[in-house]
Amino acid sequence: MSERVWTAALVVIGDEVLSGRTQDKNVAQVASWLQVQGIRLMEVRVVPDVEKRIAEAVNALRTTHDYLFTTGGIGSTHDDITVDSVARALGVPVVVHPEARRILEDYYATRGGLTEARLRMARVPQGADLIPNRMSGAPGIKIGNVHLMAGVPHICAQMLDALTGTLEGGAPLVSETTGCWVAESEVADLLREVEAAHPLCQIGSYPFFREGKVGANFVIRSTDAAELKSCADTLCEALGDAGHDFTPGGI
Amino acid sequence: MSERVWTAALVVIGDEVLSGRTQDKNVAQVASWLQVQGIRLMEVRVVPDVEKRIAEAVNALRTTHDYLFTTGGIGSTHDDITVDSVARALGVPVVVHPEARRILEDYYATRGGLTEARLRMARVPQGADLIPNRMSGAPGIKIGNVHLMAGVPHICAQMLDALTGTLEGGAPLVSETTGCWVAESEVADLLREVEAAHPLCQIGSYPFFREGKVGANFVIRSTDAAELKSCADTLCEALGDAGHDFTPGGI
């Protein structure tokens, strides 16, 4: 019996990531959050701040996944074009959301007032709902299965908090990690055999060099907790029998 | 006169990034390296360790950009399927590269010998050349405009080093950054005007919250150094005239 798997994709809007200037932090935080909701992140695209390119990515991914997230480009400046791009993708006009306007009026009441530039942050694709943001007033935006989140990582985190428990998901993917000071090529056969014996589990092998030595972490993932434990036990036993010192929880 | 722009895309192969377990470091390092080669990174896709999905991303991006890079999945274990996926995308068989085999034989001569698992790292799509890797023996792979790089960041860095100066590019995109303790919404009009007056430059605005205060960095990018300087000077003057303390180089 195979369970319904819920999937998501993420579009990072992203000249600053594509230039190498900014190290993206949203992929990891959106991925970890989705994991807990029982939703699997299946693809990420980082696209430039170009309306047509954003719209293409949104349309390619919103139709092939249960949920789509975007990060970045929902601020008040000329380079914030996510709302226009998503509206274009969906074929709807951009309107000022009355509740967003009210939120911004309140927020800026003691901060110099709601200017025309700031009012840009109340613009949404027609038909959208808001995602609350306790941090800086300007809300995130939800339209259909598309969620527009802030690019600043801790504001994005606030918006994820506000969405927690509101999206339908499946059984969360759980994982166990074992680390070993070994070249992964030495245990490649062993890993393949243990994975083959546990069809409900995937084993990922992640080599590293540290303190002048080679090592690898082996991450086992499954939606079935009992199978996960059985697979982890079998792997540790096999590593031990092969004469390797392993470290549960990874190195 | 508009110059030829050279573009690249990157496919990150990527269950460990999509699960949120690993913070990717290769996007930033490949992006920065390409910048110096005069090549613009235009899109990144992070895809799961699934042959069909990797092949689709490779085919979508290798035909629309001058160069395609992949990171990850070229090691010795069962989950390393990048070579097979790229061969499938290109419609060529996988073969053992004699030079790669010789390199691995040498490397493992004092490290337990070349096992069948280790020999996996000599497999390439037919017709491929090797990208040297002084760090751990196993080479990267170059076939047509597709470059298969290691997922471990400092091995990827070694392979980028080996490619330095071998790819044709255009004028490097140069940038200047100015930081300001200001809400970006306060200077949105000013930014738009300065950008409009300098058609060869793009200005990106990257807000942040730090030490309990709002601020923003403004990054100006151009392939024309004189225009870049003129735009930066104009922006700093405009920020100063508007009564803001700015910090050249960013905050």
Image (cartoon, coloured by chain):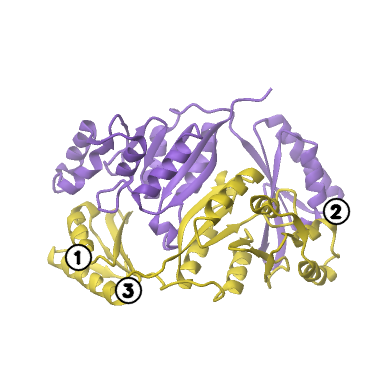
Chain colours: A purple, B yellow
Residue type at numbered disc 1:
Ala
Instruction: Determine contact: label 3, label 2, CB under 8 Å.
Output: no
Mark 1, other Cα within 10 Å: few <14 / some 14–19 / many ≥20: few
Q: Residue B242: name its quadrant.
A: bottom left
* Image quadrant in which the N terminus of chain A is located: top right
Residue type at numbered disc 2:
Gly
Along the horizontal axis of the image, is B103 left or right of B188? right
Residue B205 visible to an observer of this rendering: yes
Q: Residue at x 81, y 70 (%)?
A: B102
Residue A30 appears at what percent x and percent y?
47, 42
Label placed on residue B107: none
Q: Which residue is mark 2?
A: A243
Task: Out of B177 and A251, give the one closest to the viewer.
Answer: B177
Residue type at numbered disc 3:
Asp
Residue A133 visible to an observer of this rendering: no
Q: Which residue is mark 1?
A: B197
Instruction: Determine contact: label 1, label 3, CB under 8 Å.
Output: no
Judge if badges 1 and 3 mark residues of a common chain: yes
Q: Which residue is mark 3?
A: B224
Judge if badges 1 and 2 mark residues of a common chain: no
Which chain is mark 2 on? Answer: A
* Image quadrant in which the C terminus of chain A is located: bottom right
Spatial CA distance of label 1 from label 3 is: 15 Å
Mark 3, other Cα within 10 Å: few <14 / some 14–19 / many ≥20: some
Residue A142 appears at what percent x and percent y?
36, 33
Q: Residue A124: name its quadrant.
A: top left
Spatial CA distance of label 3 from label 2 is: 60 Å
Along the horizontal axis of the image, is B235 left or right of B144? left
Q: Residue at x 25, y 52 (%)?
A: A77
